[in-house]
Image (spheres, helix red, strand yellow):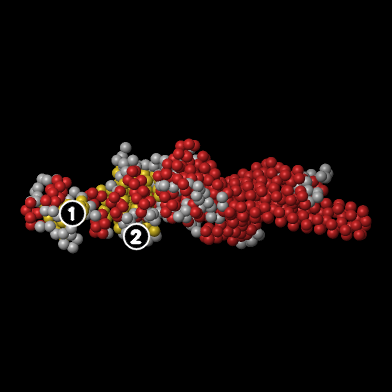
Amino acid sequence: MSEEAIVFNKLCKNYGSINAISDITFAIPRGAVCGLLGPNGAGKTTTFRILCGYLKPSGGSVTIFGHKPGSESLLHGRVLALPQDAILPPSTTIRAFLAYLGSLQGLTGEKLTAEVKRVLNLVGLTEAAGQSGKSMSHGMARRVALASSLLGSPEVVLLDEPTGGLDPRNAQAVRQIISALAGKCTVVIASHNLAEIQEICSHVAIIDHGKLTAFGTVSDLCRRGEHFIITLGKEPNLEKLKAALPEATLNWDKEKCELFCQKSGETAISLDELTRKVLGELIKMSATILGLKMGESLEKRYLELT
Amino acid sequence: MFKDILRVVKFEFSLHLSSTRIWLNSILFIAIGLIGTFVYSIIAREVKTTAMQVGAQAGGVLGSFGVATSLDESYKSSVFFVVKHISDCEVLIDSAAACTDATITLSACDKSVCQLYNELLPVPPLMLGALWFFIMLLPFLGAILSFDMISSELQHRTASFPLLRISRRTWYIGKLSAHTILIWSLTLLMLFVIIATGWWLLPAFDVASAVKFGLKTMLLIMPFTLTYMAVIALASGLSKSHFTALFTCFALLTGLWLINLLGNAEIDNAFGTICHALSYLTPGHYEKWLWHPGISGLLQCMGIYSLFALAFTALGVLLIEKKNI
């Protein structure tokens, strides 16, 4: 069994003379939660829709478990998605709608009923199960769509802006649901919410002007293994600190009140050990520690890369 | 695949039954049946009453009897004229009397005309009118009800949900089947209204003949409806907006109708020849087959319309499978 769930190989999509995406090549491992990032019009939604099988690529290919999305029945029910702008049928109850979708996945009888109950409970809509699509708010409709993407046992879940339009409490609940999927199935999330992607994703792909500008684990992309930043209440005695920590290279950012730390060239000490040492010295100096960031924020890296 | 088609059909029905549109359409179909039959009964009664009065004034009871007989004869002549007119072959006999005249040798074509004449004569004229009405208007009623069967799902991206679970082909056929059964059911409802109203309003209405012919009509209408619903689904799948879908539906139906009309008109130029050749590819060209007599006629007609339905459905499936949605 291949370790890669989704493989993009020189994927291109043109709309007339406009190249929406071109030459996208990367592979998402099984069980990964991968964020798909990019500015508006970068090609995220096009990539997402090709993955769902709604759009046909103009060139190259994308395969999920070795099969082309949209054309092969082997993927039906194994790849589910939360489309960004799909409208629910207006005149049917969400329970009936989810039961219909579940039945198309081969679920029947009590198993189907239990599954519909489970996903409705998961998105906090148990009590709204009898409501019809037209009587739902945008947020509720998004949660129904999310519930539909969790029906059965999908192996790949594609989520386009999963927390878009949700209030903070529901957004947090959705993030928890996604985090719980990690390792069990492969998840792809197209989003603009960088903090959210950093929180829940193991991998990130950044697309800009239709091209892949970066792909890797969140740790690698944010250089988490290279340096850390400590936010302090006021400037420490930097000379004293440098003298106590010869294995560290330290720089003070006056404007942000941040202490940038990384290993000196030849030292064999690990970054975790160095972090403990620096924090220990700062505590000894009675410095006010306001925060610790391993590597850079995804936002900073994103702005550098796009 | 078949099970999934049934699931789509079932879900489509539940959607339709909970929408106001289907109820408005049911009312429309019932109203057309009621009003049509009512108007027909008034005209039939008035014509007969006036003729009988004229007859009575001219010749008393004998005069009335004479008028009644002449009305019967004139109806027989009308039926024979229509049957002769819709025949595909060369008819040699010129009156219905030839059908019963043992001294005349009938050709195969004449025999088929006489068979149809004998089949249609006992059928209440109202029922013949109903079949003619279905042939003429069913495609357009279908278009009004179902022009957005595919386009609406594409426009609102509601199709995104089922299409992750089943193939586009299954989904398309499921939707087409559901809409066809719906239109067919509404036609059945209209036919029921026509028979019931005819029985109530027309004194000489033969219910047994009407029901027998009604059953044949419903069998004939089944592939006929499927054919036109396949055309409507094809047009609906070409677009993602309601207005364009409606326009495309009517344009396609009118186009098919025009090709058939021009193909049957005797135009002596290259355009006429092309239209004539193309008319064989339009379902309208085979409408006369709906009037073919006997079981073999019924089967022939069902066969040709089933082929058309299959061809239009295949084309629709091909287009939807290639489409970016």
Instruction: Place residue B299 in its image quadrant.
Output: top right
The residue that label 1 is drawn on is A289
Q: Residue furthest bottom?
A: A255
* In this rendering, position of residue A223 left or right of residue A39: left
The location of residue B293, given as percent across then percent down, is 71, 45
* In this rendering, position of residue B181 left or right of residue B110: left
| Gap in angstroms between the C-alphas marked 2 and 1 | 37 Å
Dot 1 alpha-carbon crowd within 10 angstroms: few under 14, some 14 to 19, many 20 or more = some
Q: Nearer the viewer, residue B7 or B212?
A: B7
Q: Residue at x 63, y 52 (%)?
A: B26
The residue that label 2 is drawn on is A40
Q: Nearer the viewer, residue B134 or A44?
A: A44
Q: Residue at x 65, y 44 (%)?
A: B219
The location of residue A290, given as percent across then percent down, is 20, 55
What chain letter is assigned to the residue under label 2? A
The location of residue A24, given as percent across then percent down, is 31, 52
**Callout 1: helix, strand or loop?**
strand
- What's the residue type where badge 2 is placed? Asn
Q: Earlier in the sequence, mark 2 or mark 1?
A: 2
Q: Residue furthest left?
A: A243
